[in-house]
Image: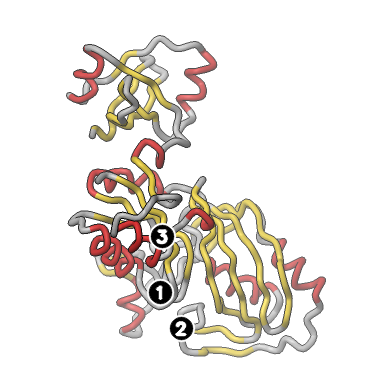
Amino acid sequence: MNIVVSINKPAGITSQDAVTRVKRILKVKKAGHTGTLDPMATGLLLVCINRATRLSSYFLNSNKKYAAVMKLGESTDTQDSSGTIMATGDISGLEVCDIKEAVQGFQGLISQLPPMYSALKHKGEPLYKLARKGVEVERKPREIMIYDIETQCIDLPFVSFSVACSKGSYIRTLCYDIGKKLGTEAHMSGLQRTAVGDFLLEQSLTFEELEEIGQGGQITKGVYTMDEAMSWMPSVTVDGIQMKQVRNGVPLQLNLSAEKADSFETAPGIRVKSLDGELMAIGSFSALNNSIKMDVVF
C-alpha cells in the first residue's frame, strides 16, 4: 500500500495525531504528512503511506489556499485564538471599505516575519518551545507570495477572507499584519486549508469515511496512487534497457524537441513511468545534456 490519502483534519488534534490515526485505520507502519496544520486549524492534510513518504518534499513546495477568520481589536502571543491576549486596539472607527482595502493591500510579494510560535528552529530547537519558556530570538523577515486574497464577510470584530499563497506563509501573521495596517490589533480566530496544489478539500476524507475504506468499503475519493498524486508533473515512459537504468539510478538520455525541453526544464520534477503505468522514479531535467537525473527511485 503505497498511496497518498487526503484527510479533512478536524480541529483539536495535531497533524501528527492525524497521521497516527491514519496509520491505525489503514494498519500501516510508515506514514507522514506533507505540511503541518495547527491543532486549531481544520482542512486538507495530505498523508503519504509507505514508499509514498518519499514524495513528501514535493508537496511541501506546493501553493496553498485557506479560508480564514480574523478578529480585529485583540492581538495574542501566538497570533491566534489559542494564545493569551497581549494588546487591544480600538476598532470603532473602522469602515468596511477601509478593511477591504487593507486586506487587498497584502496581495503580491510581501515580507513576513515568522512568528515565535512556529516549528522553525533556532540552534536546533523549535521556536515554539523557546516561546513557551518566554524566550524570544531574532528572526529574519521572509518574502512570500500572496497570489490572491479576498474579503468574504465583515461582521466586526470578525473578518472572513480567502487567501491563496506560497509555501512558508503564516496566515496568523498575515492577520496580525492586517491589524497593524488598520491601526489596531488582530489575531486569527479560525483557519481551514482548502487546497494544496491541485488537491481540493471537497475531495478529502473524514476519519469516519476513512474507517469505512479501512473496513473494505469502496474508495470514491481522497485516495491516490503515487502516480495519480504526482499527475501535475510531466512524464516520460521507458521500456527495455532504460527500465533497468532507471532502477539503478542512471540518468536517462532523451531526444526532445525544444518546446518539450522547455516544459521539462521549468517543471518541479519529471515522472518516469514504465509501459504499464508504474511510477518508477521522479527526476529533474538537465537541458545541458538533455537528460533526466533520478532524484527518487522507487
Q: Please report the residue visible at 30 percent of the width from the left and 61 percent of the height from the top.
A: 22
Which sits earlier in the primary sequence, circle 2 or circle 3?
A: 3
Q: Which residue is mark 1?
A: 39
In the image, is 91 to the left or to the right of 256?
Answer: right
Q: Quadrant of residue 274?
A: top left
Q: Amino acid at mark 3?
A: Ile
Mark 1–mark 3 Cα distance, whole angstroms, equals 14 Å
Task: Assign a secondary structure to mark 2.
Answer: loop
Q: Which residue is mark 2?
A: 82
Mark 1–mark 2 Cα distance, whole angstroms, equals 9 Å
Q: Amino acid at mark 1?
A: Pro
Q: What is the x, y in percent for residue 120?
A: 36, 64
Task: Assign a secondary structure to mark 1.
Answer: loop
Which sits earlier in the primary sequence, circle 1 or circle 2?
A: 1
Between tags 2 and 3, which lies in front?
3
Q: Which residue is mark 3?
A: 7
Q: Quadrant of residue 131?
A: bottom left
Give neighbour class at mark 1: few <14, some 14-19, many 20+ (Cα, 10 Å): some
In the image, is 138 to the left or to the right of 19?
Answer: right
Which sits earlier in the primary sequence, circle 1 or circle 3?
A: 3
Q: Please report the residue visible at 34 percent of the width from the left and 26 percent of the height from the top.
A: 277
In the image, is 209 to the left or to the right of 252?
Answer: right
Q: Please report the residue visible at 50 percent of the width from the left and 18 percent of the height from the top.
A: 260
Q: In the rendered structure, are the residues bearing label 2 and label 3 in contact, judged by CB atoms less than 8 Å apart? A: no
